[in-house]
Image (tube, grey):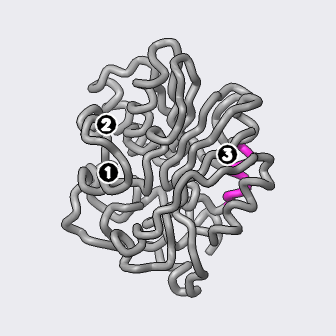
Amino acid sequence: MKKEEVKQIVKKHYGTIAVQNGVGCGCSSGCCGDKKTTNEDIAKSIGYQDSEIRHASEANLGLGCGNPTGISSIKEGDVVLDLGSGAGFDCFLAAQKTGSAGRVIGVDLTQEMIDKADQNKTKFNHANVEFRLGDIEDLPVEDASVDVIISNCVINLAPDKLKVFQEAHRVLRRGGRMFISDIVLLRQLSDDQRGNEELIAGCVGGAMLKDEYLAIVKNAGFEVKILSEDTGIGGRQYQGLPLESLLIEATK
């Protein structure tokens, strides 16, 4: 499948999720698992605390495979960039840590998600957060302007993952860090699974093998540390598919 076809699938599905407030096929949305599971249940299962969910409940669309704000060491005054910011859930949590002296930038491919995030920003009164429409393979962010990058189950959706990490390396300051939660494969999928639109939108069809994923992060110029691996998520949310949620820290 061509790169632009993949991006159109992602735009279509996540635009629907934004408009329908979390209903639709997306990462951890239940398409590959239990459709009765709530957004709050999913958030708790991947590491979010009750206080975090309450803080920005309407921005929690039940997407993601980990909690990158929880594992990151965001400090007051930091500039934070969220790759694939969705309705803004992780951005609003990060903004609590940066305080008014810092700021948070969310980048998302889907206009409907940007619109929803802007609505939530007004509702939650986070003046230090902004959302930009853009492709994480070509970030609308200045060179060496970011202290911390976070991303929650989004990079697997990008056709050119090396380009994503090269762009992340470009916008980070020296010593800057990425905290990434993402789906990686433990063995290869079939061609039919690779081309399945539901699995592509559900963060499986476009995922890479774990070792290949780690290799491209290093090839982009980062030092990589594995923080945790959730091998049970395949059984909980993806009907036993051979995958895991990988949480890493990558330092420039």
Residue at 56%, 51% in the rendered image? 227
Residue at 30%, 42% in the rendered image? 49
Location of mark 2 (residue): 52
Q: Earlier in the sequence, mark 3 or mark 2?
A: 2
Residue 42's image quarter? bottom left
| In magenta segment, residue 208 | no
Identify the secondary structure beneath mark 3.
strand
Residues shaded magenta: 160-167
Give the image location of residue 80, x and y in percent.
56, 30
Q: Is residue 23 above or below residue 49?
A: below
Give the image location of residue 197, x and y in percent.
46, 73
Location of mark 1 (residue): 43
Identify which amino acid the numbered label 1 is placed on: Ala
Identify the secondary structure beneath mark 1.
helix
Q: In this view, does 68 lie above or below 25?
A: above
Disc 1 + disc 3, Cβ < 8 Å:
no
Residue 212's image quarter? bottom right
Identify which amino acid the numbered label 3 is placed on: Ala
Q: Quadrant of the C terminus?
A: top right
Callout 3: 10 Å neighbours few (<14), some, many (20+)?
Answer: many
Q: Nearer the viewer, residue 138 or 149?
A: 149
Q: Residue 250 carries which label?
A: 3
Disc 3 + disc 2, Cβ < 8 Å:
no
Identify which amino acid the numbered label 2 is placed on: Glu
Q: Earlier in the sequence, mark 1 or mark 3?
A: 1
